[in-house]
Image (cartoon, rainbow, N blue to C red):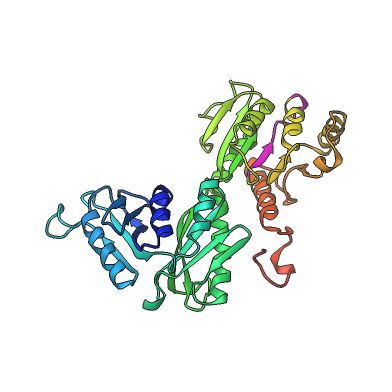
Amino acid sequence: MREVIDDLLGWWRSGATVGMATVVRTWRSSPRPPGATMLVGPDGTAVGSVSGGCVEGAVYELAQEVVGNRAPVVERYGVSDDDAFAVGLTCGGIIELLVEPVDRTSFPELERVAQAIARRDPVAVVSIVEGPADSVGRRLVVWPTDADGTLGSARLDAAVTDDARGLLAAGRTDTLHYGLGGERRGEGLTVFVASYAPPARMLVFGAIDFAASVARIGGFLGYHVTVCDARPVFATSKRFPGADEVIVDWPHRYLQGEIDAGRVDDRTVICVLTHDPKFDVPVLQVALSREFAYVGAMGSRRTHDDRMDRLREAGVTATELARLSSPIGLDLGARTPEETAVSIAAEIIAGRWGGGGARLTTTAGRIHHD
């Protein structure tokens, strides 16, 4: 929807009804990813694409139908059995579309969604795409600290809100499955979660073996991972295949540049693994001068004590030091780089969702935190 939001919002504000088709699931070699959107406006104008041209004609007609009867439908398109160039995908893939009427009545939250997208603030739009006929198209909009709309029941809304926030934090769009009563392990109901947020960033400073494992698990968690080190002999893409990018620069200079350019935000996590004062003290001064989601630094107890003294001498305040996780990670007894990466990831997750790190078998009440 991001690519067509201006047209959609203009028609919505005018009070018109728009036919909107959204790719919700794909199989094999599909031309457009989940979330791709096509609009059919009140004047017959088509905006956007769901298949790169393969099935747009059929979707155009279907969108006009749903505007007329105001009944959302889910339609699947694949290769035509009779003619690959008929109403089908010539690439051999399969796409599933949610086609629905959109106006002020059916999507009252659109203005807020558009504002969040414009500001690059995280927001997820959740729609039922499989379930009882009268439930298809129901919508719930989820922000990190708010939600609007309903999918039909308080229990379902609560479960989906929790899960959508997890996808939103990772910048992922996906389908999720529930029981008709909102049970997470149930069946009968499928929702599509369209996340409108760039993936959160993980900045790993220090091109060491532990950094390679942290980069891999950061990617697994959905972060856009950058490894940065001032030593070109160590900071290479070959040594860090799990990173999205490898930067050769002084850590503090690179971080300050990313801050100045607005390429980091309060979802960014920072892992300082250099345990060398000439690298980690300057970069931690920069990192602790603003509030990131997580700032951790690796090192022994002796290294930690020395680092804290150096940071205090450099003028870092007690409030800023309280934001530092050092030594980095949770107490899992980790020894290897891979185990240490799990320990670091566990602390990041706990910080994101308010977990205490205790074994669930020793706790009671809700498993998922607000």
**113 or 270: which is nearer to us?**
113
Residue 45 seen from this side: yes
Tell me what residue is drawn at x 15 percent, y 60 percent. 81
The reply to whether the magenta stretch includes residue 270 is yes
Q: Quadrant of residue 9?
A: bottom left
Tell me what residue is drawn at x 67 percent, y 28 percent. 251
Question: Which stretch is magenta?
Answer: 268-278
Q: Position of residue 191 (x, y in %)?
A: 45, 66
Q: Is residue 327 left or right of residue 341?
A: right
Q: Position of residue 259 (x, y in %)?
A: 64, 34
The reply to whether the magenta stretch includes residue 3 is no
Q: Quadrant of residue 229?
A: top right
Q: Position of residue 117 (x, y in %)?
A: 51, 50
**286 or 326: which is nearer to us?**
286
Q: Is residue 156 left or right of residue 255?
A: left
Quadrant in which the C terminus appears: bottom right
